[in-house]
Image: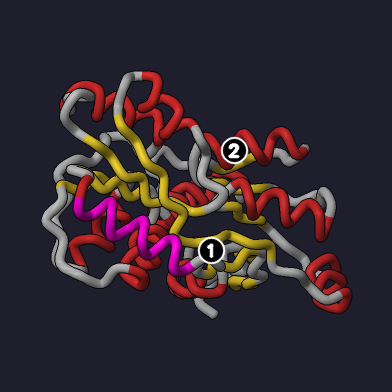
Amino acid sequence: MDRTLPLADKCILITRSKEQASYFSKQVQKLGGTPLEVPLIQFSLPANLEKVASELEEAVAHYEWLVFTSVNGVNHFFQLHNKPLTNKIAAVGSKTKEALAARGYETDLVPSSYSAENLVEEISCRLDPSQDKLALIQGNLARPVLREELLRLGYNVKRITVYENKPLSLAKEEIEAVVQKKLDLITFTSPSTVHNFKKAFGLLDVPVAVIGPITEKAAVQAGFKVSVNPEVYTIDGLLKEIITYFQREDT
């Protein structure tokens, strides 16, 4: 191992879903670190597929805007409705925008900061509540603030749940293996990873890195000490801040 690399000798726990963890792990390895993948969440299509598919058909036909709040929302939407779109599109976050671009769709509205609150502000400045109807494409654990605030402002809003975020149970042996491991950092990328980790492992005396203020709030309320929270709410932004954190701690 090249010990001049910024994450040399560092073991970093990754709690994302198995599908999402790969890029994060590869980047940690490139930086000299050891990624430990322990998926604590899993994503699946909703049980009521016919009902959701029907809701999507109606929304695409009658709603001017489709609002995607995550990459998962994009991926599961197109599993359920893989037909050309003529709607205007809003997206929260650069990765969500990129996922749409990969499918050939440009986004008409992306808030400068990756949060539902900022999206509400952008929508209220640009869209007319008497004319523009919005379909929110989300998961079952999405915060209700986006829909509630848009309804309060007078918009016609329909929320459609296109995927489910469920906890992934770990065997006793898996839990014991993690507890016995010398971890240098635990990473959380959503409130659900925080809650599921605490349920499985309790509060370990290990520094924590998070993405975004909502995940940070969940971690702090759960009793974790958050040491890293990047200004840019992406995995690359998180990695940059992790490097800075260890450089500071190791000097």
Front in this rendered view, residue 17 or 84: 84
Q: Identify the image quadrant of the N terminus.
A: bottom right
Magenta residue check for 50: yes
Q: Position of residue 118 (x, y in %)?
A: 34, 29
Rendered image quadrant of residue 179: bottom right
Q: Secondary structure at mark 2?
A: helix
- Decide if residue 108 is on the left or right side of residue 195: left
**Disc 1 vs disc 2: which is toward the camera?**
2
Front in this rendered view, residue 97 or 230: 97
Residue designated by label 2 = 216
Sequence-earlier tag: 1 or 2: 1
Front in this rendered view, residue 154 or 111: 154
Identify the residue at horizontal 88%, vertical 74% (top origin): 172
Q: Which residues are magenta?
A: 49-61
Identify the residue at horizontal 51%, vertical 35% (top origin): 144
Q: Position of residue 219 (x, y in %)?
A: 67, 40
Residue designated by label 1 = 7
Amino acid found under the numbered disc labelled 2: Glu
What is the spatial separation of the Cα atoms under label 1 and label 2, in whole angstroms? 23 Å
